[in-house]
Image (tube, rainbow, N blue to C red):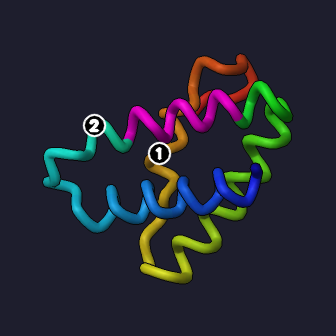
Amino acid sequence: MDMLLEEELIDLMTFCLQNPQSPDIEEKKKRITEIGGEIFMDGGIDAMENFFFVLKNRISEEIGKDPSIFKPLWNGFSDEWKH
């Protein structure tokens, strides 16, 4: 499951970064938030940190853009995650 969520997040974030004016952005951000909740429920804050580390590395290398702007979408799942 983790691998599928990772790939889905990469696709969603890459799309958002490459198509910032798309009318689909809000729907994609909503799904990013939902996946963040699933990750938190499954593994807590450590899982969220680990996922984002991998996402940042892969997306930064693949398209040269930083997905950190999406970290705030996962705010609210834990008091420790404040971005």
**Please, is residue 13 above or below residue 30 in the view?**
below
Q: Between residue 4 and residue 73, name the one nearer to us.
A: 4
Quadrant that contains the C terminus: top right
Q: Amino acid at mark 1?
A: Phe
User: Where's residue 32, x and y in %?
Assistant: 49, 41
The residue tagged 2 is 26
User: Where's residue 44, x and y in %?
Assistant: 82, 30
User: Residue 42: which numbered mark, if any?
Assistant: none
Instruction: Judge left or right: residue 52 versus residue 29.
Output: right
The residue tagged 1 is 70
Disc 1 is placed on an element classified as helix
Residue drawn at (74%, 30%), measured in percent from left and top? 40
- Separation of disc 2 and disc 1 at Cα? 12 Å
User: Where's residue 61, x and y in %?
Assistant: 55, 82
Range of magenta residues:
29-38
Q: Amino acid at mark 2?
A: Glu
Question: Label 1 crowding class (10 Å Cα cut-off): few <14, some 14-19, many 20+?
Answer: some
